[in-house]
Amino acid sequence: MPTVSDQLLDRFHFYLDGADSALVADAVARIDWDMPSRPLEPRPLSCLRHLDRIAEAAPQGARLLARFVADHREELRWGQTYTATDFGQAFIDNYGWLEVFGTRGYFVNDAVAAGLLILGPDIVYPDHHHTAEEIYIPLTGSTEWRMGEGCFRVREAGEVIHHASNVSHAMRTGKEPLMALYIWRDGPLAQKSIIGSEGRS
């Protein structure tokens, strides 16, 4: 019988296979999906209270994945890279990620990490950058994203957002929470992002 993590990987893979993007297709093609699994104990976070609204707001193509995560939230291991010292307690109470595969996820992969990010409403994820190349696909809309020295602009669900190595980026949510799928590759897969945008664009 498939485990919750097996089902999560299947839904994650299914969503990515449907993405209309050459960049995503290349990333998916380079992933060895026959990955060994690792057991992880559940770890809930405060941000999970937003999952029902996220599942309601997700468009049809993303709803299968978002609803599954919402239904199994208490069985999954959620993580946080930052602490209240970095961005404040309000951020920490509305932020978390779920790594499906990578160096910390349910499935072992030393070449690429991928998972889901949650941000609650009215949250700013300040400028930060990291060595790994990053691909984001928001599963919900209305969040504003900024890259380099550019302005914030709204990105809709299903848009593909690409951050090259060490390119500064930031996000801010409005009245709705965000769930975004992410892929990290070609860099340290568990690196804590460097806060700020000093010379990174």
Image (cartoon, helix red, strand yellow):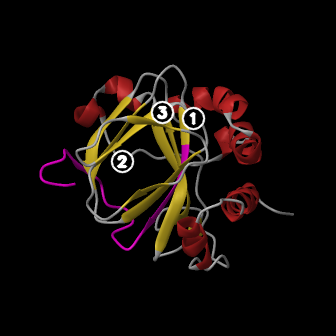
Q: Which residue is mark 2?
A: 81
Q: Quadrant of residue 69?
A: top right
Numbered marks: total: 3
Q: Secondary structure at mark 3?
A: strand
Q: Secondary structure at mark 1?
A: loop
Q: Is residue 57 rendered to the left or right of residue 97?
A: right
Q: Amino acid at mark 3?
A: Thr
- The residue positioned 58% from the left and 76% from the top of the image is 31
> Picture coordinates of residue 27 (x, y %)?
54, 72
Between 11 and 198, the one lying in front of the other is: 198
Work out which residue is located at the far right of the displayed protein and give it.
Answer: 1
Q: Nearer the observer, disc 1 or disc 2?
A: 1
Q: Is residue 115 left or right of residue 186?
A: right
Q: Amino acid at mark 2?
A: Thr
Q: Gap in Å between the C-alphas at discs 1 and 2?
A: 24 Å
Between tags 2 and 3, which lies in front?
3
Task: Point out the stretch of residues depicted in magenta.
Answer: 180-201
- Residue 24 screen position, x and y as percent: 57, 66
Residue 199 painted magenta? yes
Instruction: Give the Cα distance between marks 1 and 3.
Output: 6 Å
Labels 2 and 3: the sequence-earlier one: 2
**Which residue, given by chain and number where applicable, does mark 3 sit on?**
143
Q: Label 2, label 3: how many angstroms apart (C-alpha)?
A: 21 Å
Q: Can the viewer see residue 84 in this picture?
A: yes
